[in-house]
Amino acid sequence: MPRRLALIRVVRAAVAAVVIVALHVAPTTPAAAAADVPVTTTNGLLPDGMDWRITMPDRGWNGTLLLDLDFVTGGVNAAYTTLHGRGYAAAGVRRIPFDQGGRDARVSAAQLIQVIDVFTERYGEPRYVITNGGSSGGVVAGYTMERYPDRIDGAVANCTVPGYIPYLMPRLSSLFAAKVFLGIDLPIVQHPGTNFALDADSWRAAIDAAQATPAGRARIALALTLGQMNTWTNAALPPPDVTDLDQVQAYMYDTLRNLYAFDVNTRRNQEQQVGGQSFTWTTGFDYRKIFFTMTLPEQQAAVRKFYRAAGLDLAADLKTINKASRIEADPAAVNEIHLHGDYTTRPQRPFLMNNLIGDPLVQPAANFGYLQEARKHGKGRFVRLIHVNGAGHCSFRANESVAAIEIMNERVRTGVWPSTAPADLNSRATRIDPALVPRFINYRNPEFAGGFWAGDTYKAEK
């Protein structure tokens, strides 16, 4: 904790003093880019020791700078190669490790702003700056846009959700429901960190055993539904036929059996930043209301079918979980983690959220929750959601990622959103790279049950 706070103080001081320091700059090295456009890459260190990386097309710069949290480690890929060939410069830093206060968007956003100044010193001021990122990089992309509207013209957040609490809250409900309905005795918050792999295996074994019985199949479907989790999350499986409820349930089973391994260790890493205290909770949720009014229709239909087949009383199970002893959070821990990436839902710049409908770590419903809140504040015009019919975490095809950037670049230049209809997105992506088949689709998001935004306060139930 002291090291993290010291890092925050250093970054804030550097920004306040407008100190631009580039130490240990690597020699300029040209590299090949798309369409035979060479690029120049430079590297250096910010005042706090964070390394930065800038890649600039040697000719044809379109005036737009893309700013990416993960650019030092992830800036060499097919999407960025294509973007450089289309005239984009790009820059960024790397993620801070968890044990040094990682996943604190306040620190990362301030570092990215400093990188703009480093870029400007070397190449001149960009006409437009677009934050771009995936996963936690997407959290930082949106956070930076909200907090620095005078420096950022737009944001593209891929395979991510608006903030860390909205990310982990609904997932906890699915884990909690599985524990209640299936009698699984494993920690889902404040995991001690020992024997985690064994616990993940035990979770899978418990879900496998439940799937072997009619009652277990019904309750697996209900548990996943109550957390608003995605049906399909396994990239090795084809997209489900949502009219085939047996297949829907089978995919829900696959998602729930792997949820523990995806979720609990990530939650623990962030709990360790607040003294090991829990910052997510299940108090206050009406699971009956969530089931009947805030779920995907195919999931609700699958639950009903399998409950009938098992001869179970769905209403009784919903009553059981609503009466179950809930998980409470520590208010101080909530407040601290909330500050690491809390979204205001009042964007002043365009914000595009691009998600795979089968991402195991991301529920598109959370982004719909952000859009709903933005509309309440009269800011809905700044927000667009687009969806890709794919599974796996951040497993976009390069032309899908580039299409999202091109949409935002057009929006910041013209002040008008180009069409984000799936057919138009697919046409745009095909023009970018005809060898890749794009997968943009229409997608119905349910109302989000786990919204928690800047200014919200958690109060433990008495």
Image: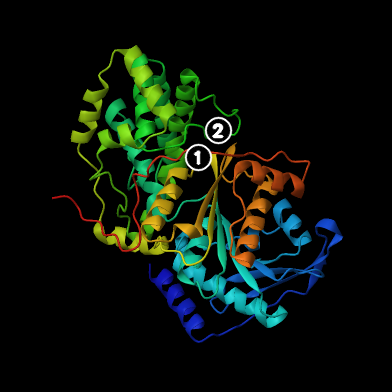
Residue position marked by numbered label 1 in the rendering: 360
Q: Are marks 1 and 2 in contact (CB under 8 Å)?
A: yes
In the image, residue 445 sits, relative to residue 126, either above or below, namely above
**Residue type (three-letter) at the residue carrying disc 2:** Asn
235 relative to 332 in the view: left or right: right
* Residue 304 image position (x, y, % from top left): 35, 21
- Secondary structure beneath label 1: loop
* Residue 382 image position (x, y, % from top left): 50, 60
Q: How many marks?
A: 2
- Quarter of the figure with residue 284: top left
**Residue type (three-letter) at the residue carrying disc 1:** Pro
Give the spatial CA distance, label 1 vs label 2.
7 Å
User: What coloring was used for the rendering?
Assistant: rainbow
Name the N-terminal-most of marks 1 and 2: 2
- Quarter of the figure with residue 416: bottom right
Q: Residue at the spot x=22%, y=41% of the render?
A: 326
